[in-house]
Image (cartoon, rainbow, N blue to C red):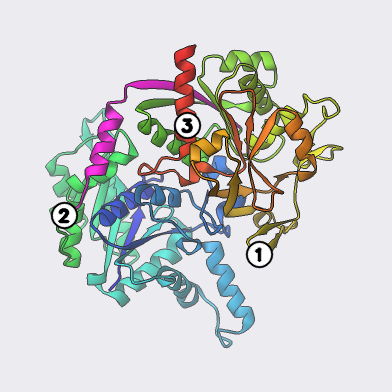
Amino acid sequence: MTKYIFITGGVVSSLGKGIVTSSLASLLKLSKFNLRIRKLDPYLNIDPGTMNPAQHGEVFVTDDGAETDMDLGHYERFTGIISKKSDNITTGKVYSEVLRKERKGDYLGSTVQVIPHVTNEIKKFIKKDLKNEDFVICEIGGTVGDIESLPFLEALRQLRNELGKEKSLFIHITLVPFISSANEFKTKPTQHSVKELLGLGIQPDLLICRTEKKFSKDSKKKISLFCNLSLDSVLMLENAQTIYEVPLKLHNEGLLRKLNSHFALKIKKTNLDFWNKFYQKFVCLEKEINVAIVGKYTNLSESYKSLNEALFHSGIFNNTRVKISWIDSRRIKDFNKTQKTLENFQGILVPGGFGKEGSSGKINAIKFAKTFKIPFLGICFGMQLAIIESLRNLKGYEKSSSTEFGKTDFPVISMMHEWEKGKKIHKQDLDNLGGSMRLGSYKSILKKNTLVFKIYKKTKIFERHRHRYEVNYNYLKPIVNSGITLSGMSPNKKLVEIIERTNHPWFIGVQFHPELKSTPFKPHPIFNSFISAMLKFKSKS
């Protein structure tokens, strides 16, 4: 029988609910349980696809083409379980479905209300698309006390009554701040947060207290007393050196023992060998490289979370500490300034992005990497700009551009109004930004005797896409004449998926997002090779 674990957060945002959820899921998977991990987001957007990454963070894309919250990326990285469209819901999706049913007449003239209609829809989402999983873990976005999350919390309260305590568990994550001037930990924020939950009819079964360092048993007793919990139901989670240390910390705090007790489980052994070895590799890294990520959303590293993690995974794979510097492309419009800014890096990466703003700085970074033979990786928009930069050096194509930047006589990059995926023709909804992109997993055919073929060691690959514009196949011949090898193409040979430079030791552009499939268990081969190339470049310079 499926059991449900609900994870909420209180006091402040950014406590790491997603990491705790992912770590718990990892421990359960390593204990041989089948599970699904879901995120309930209280914002009114249908999905985060049109939200500014500098405000919301990265948009994670699943194999089946869903634009989801970045926490689903954490779920995949910690567990290897592939997320689906049905694993992320927003208030916008809930209300859209309720209103659709109301217009259709499904409610038979009833007055449509938050209770029961909205809460019923939330409960239906939590239970849908399951195949006899042992556990369903649901993380509720936002902070307890926010008005937006009230319908979700009410739905969970109802579910607890329907399922019973033996099939459901509430974990609440709070902050226990340390006040240095008073030299003590303060438990009052946690008490108030739990009181807020109790006022909504939810008694947490476990408290996970985020803290800078371990607090005293007296503080733990105080939390236990005022939050109506047993002493061993209050767990401490102090700051970790890396997020991948959190499964070990939670295991050491006895999280699985509490689940054993609550659900009457029989967990014989949890194999933590991988996380122990991974952490030991992390603390004993012998080499170091510096990579520049040249982008527009560099003020918030969460905008490129999967990219950051993919470099970290492959760094561990190469026994190398990867030091990332985020370079705002809007500040390097001049090539001389670009050279001064980037001359001390062993690698340059231009990630995905949207819009003309900052594109000239990215093109300068690409030109610099090309000129000085520095390892370069262009992802999505980065690949498109690498093609534009290359063509602009070809006689007659100096004005090559993208229709994303406005009207141009040389639309090397343009919006394709239809493309093939399997036997279906997918058309772009040009009136709907949220429906105009190529999303999800697509097949690419690799050209033999190329760098990417050596990297992947196969001719057919599947990678995740998220982009609106494509390389215009009418310009494939001049692109090749400009010194580019089209090393990866769509099965119909119309869409460019991967490019290389023929006169460069390591210069690759990809239309897809390889970072979305990298995990600590299986670092992505492109990033493994990129870091290896940077190490070689460093040894020669």
Q: Of callouts 3 and 1, which one flags the residue occurring earlier in the amino acid sequence?
A: 1
Percent position (x, y) of residue 385? 69, 33
Task: Tell me where residue 120 appears, x and y as whole percent.
Answer: 45, 75
Residue position marked by numbered label 2 in the rendering: 269
Position above or below: 7 against 453: below
Q: Position of residue 351 (x, y in %)?
A: 58, 35
Which circle's residue, 1 or 2, is located before the other in the chain?
A: 2
Q: Which residues are magenta?
A: 269-295
Numbered disc 3: secondary structure: helix
Q: Which mark is residue 423?
A: 1
- 249 relative to 204, above or below: above
**Residue at numbered disc 3:** 529
Amino acid found under the numbered disc labelled 2: Lys
Alpha-carbon neighbours of circle 3 within 10 Å: few (<14), some, or many (≥20)?
Answer: some
Q: Residue at x 38, y 26 (%)?
A: 321
Circles 3 and 1: CB atoms closer than 8 Å: no
**Label 2–label 3 contact, CB within 8 A:** no
Neighbourhood count class around disc 2 (C-alpha, 10 Å): few under 14, some 14–19, many 20 upward:
few
